[in-house]
Image (spheres, helix red, strand yellow):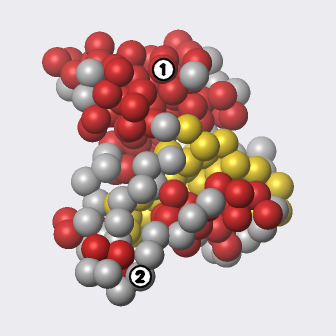
Amino acid sequence: METKNIMIVGVGGQGSLLASKLLGRLLLNQGYDVKVSEVHGMSQRGGSVVTYVRYGDKVYSPIIDKGEADFIISFEMLEAARNLEYLKKDGIVVVNTQQIDPMPVITGNASYPENLPQKMEAAGAKVDALDALSLACEAGSPKAVNIVLMGRFANYLGISDEAWQEALTQCVPTKFLELNRKAFDLGKNS
């Protein structure tokens, strides 16, 4: 199998590391060779977080170069737009419509760009935008945005729900498992 490339992008504190752990576990359970690389930046101060997940028969490097990502899963719209150059021509962006103002917007030195999903589509990306924050709140916690996005992404991966549920069981503490199962289902079926 040809190596597939997935980028998970967001802002520190949104749960992208758990999402990459879940995805990595799921793919390992399916028998793939998997490489995961985390790039933190200023994640503890609300800065960008990027995680690369690569899988296939044999993967030699955890790094994804520009133009190689089959998918970008973005926890925030501006982060999706910032990383669009990494997407393949026929790639798909699964993006939370939540807007988190970066420091230049907070300080009044810039304004948050408008119509980002439309701009990404105009640049050639296939965009699947959803309000993952509202769905996470419906599931029981705004912190479940990551699992809502994994549920939505499951529609593109072609791996059974049973396999996803097993990976959730392996990665999520028992006391949060039911909430995360609900978040996954809401993302998948919305």
Instruction: Locate residue 36, reporting x and y percent.
Output: 46, 56
Mark 1 lies on residue = 186
Q: Judge the density around disc 1: few (<14), some (14-19), many (≥20) Cα neighbours within 10 Å.
A: many
Mark 2 lies on residue = 110
Q: Amino acid at mark 2?
A: Ala
Using the rendered view, name the quadrant where residue 38 is placed: bottom left
Please say if the residues under marks 2 and 1 sit with CB atoms less than 8 Å apart. no
100 displayed left or right of 130? left
Question: Nearer the observer, disc 2 or disc 1?
Answer: 2
Q: Nearer the viewer, residue 141 or 61?
A: 141
Residue 27 to residue 62: above or below: above
Q: Which mark is residue 102?
A: none
Using the rendered view, name the quadrant where residue 119 is placed: bottom right
Q: Amino acid at mark 1?
A: Leu
89 displayed left or right of 95? right
Lower position in the chain sequence, tag 2 or tag 1: 2
Instruction: Locate residue 94, reporting x and y percent.
Output: 60, 45
At 66% across and 42% down in the image, what residue appears? 128
At 78% across and 67% down in the image, what residue appears? 123
Residue 21 to residue 134: above or below: below
Residue 81 to residue 132: above or below: below
Q: Nearer the viewer, residue 160 or 120?
A: 120
Whether residue 99 is visible: yes
